[in-house]
Structures are given as structure tokens and as C-alpha cells.
Image (cartoon, rainbow, N blue to C red):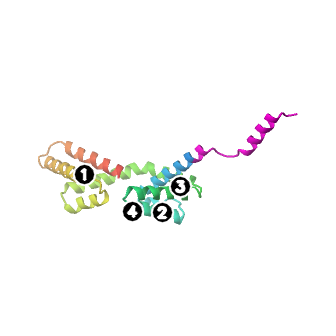
Amino acid sequence: MATADEQEDDRFDDDFSGPSKSQLKREATALQKLGEQLTTLTPVQLEKIPLPVELREAIHAAQQMRRHGARRRQLQFIGKLMRRIDTEPIQLAVDGLKTGQNTAQHRQIEQFCAALLTEDAASLNEFLTHYPDTDRQHLRHLIRNAVREQLHQKPPRSRRALFRYLREVVTAG
């Protein structure tokens, strides 16, 4: 025969069924981070990922937002939408894109670098439109030094510095 304390312990064991509050928070945060990764993808990459229409629209809206508070709220909304669906296929697709993303990103930065070295104002404006948080003065200084370096046929030290800065801006942006 069980004592009163043992019966009470059994009752508490029966009441608890499921993950802890901390575990639920960790899972929600992980989904929100996955959603944030989705907002960094290009439209072509997003087409390759199986997403519900509502989630796709929320991601597109987040990509358009520049204000920190609005973007943060939108990312929370994306996380909420993701809690309703099976995210394993999405995670697998994102992981698959990441392996090829570094190469594509490297090519994109090379193209930006080459275009900027032509000293074309349109290419500079295009880059600044894509990445508005760029330090314009520093970027112009790097371009000027790299162009001067090419004219005098010196080793591409300044061009490498320009490439590194562009990579930093693109990965942060």
C-alpha cells in the first residue's frame, strides 16, 4: 500500500507530459533563427525551398523592412508561422543552399568589385542601393586606391582590401 507522499508524487508525474517551458523557448528561438536565415536568401533561392504562401509573403515583407523594431517583430511573426508547419524540409533545403551559397556570394562580390573598379557611378549607386549601411567615404577611398594601383601596375593589395570590405558589407547586410 502506498503512503500519502507516494500517491502525491505519482499524481505530479501524471500531470507533467511534454517538453519544459525552456525547451519550448529554445525551439521557438531556433525557428526564428531559421526564419532569419530565410530572409537573407535571394528570390531565386527562396523559390527552391518548399514554403507555404503565407510564410513566403511574410519573408518577402521582412526583406523589405529596414527599421530594426519592425524587422524584429516580423521575424517573430515568421517564427510563429513556422511553429505551425513541419520545418525539417525547409531546414534541409537551406542547408543544401548554404554549401553552394559561399561560391555564389564570392562570385557576386567579385562582380561588384570589378564593376566598382570601372569607376562607373551607376555601379556604385547600385551597390549602395543594395547595401545602404555601407560607409560611402571608406568605400570610395578603397576604390580610388585600387584604381590607382591598377594604373601604376602595382600588386593588388588595395584591390584585396576592397574585396575584403565588400565581403564584410555583403555578409553583414
Closer to the camera: disc 3 or disc 4? 4
> Mark 1 or mark 2, which is nearer the start of the sequence?
2
CA distance separating discs 3 and 2: 15 Å
Disc marking residue 12: none
Q: Report the residue at 53% width, 61% height from top.
A: 51
> Mark 4 or mark 3, which is nearer the start of the sequence?
4
> Mark 4 or mark 1, which is nearer the start of the sequence?
4
Q: Are marks 1 and 3 in contact (CB under 8 Å)?
A: no
Q: Position of residue 15 (x, y in %)?
A: 73, 45
Q: Residue furthest front?
A: 4
Bin the neighbour count of mark 1 within 10 Å (Cα to Cα): few under 14, some 14-19, many 20 and up: few
Q: Nearer the viewer, residue 134 or 97?
A: 134
Q: Which residue is mark 3?
A: 90
Q: Which residue is mark 1?
A: 135
Residue type at the position of mark 4: Gln
Magenta part of the chain: 1-24
Evaluate whether residue 33 shows in this view: yes
Evaluate whether residue 156 shows in this view: no
CA distance separating discs 2 and 4: 10 Å
Q: Position of residue 164 (x, y in %)?
A: 28, 45
Looking at the rendered structure, the secondary structure element under dot 4 is helix
> Mark 3 or mark 1, which is nearer the start of the sequence?
3
> Is 100 situated left or right of 116 in this image?
right
Residue type at the position of mark 1: Asp
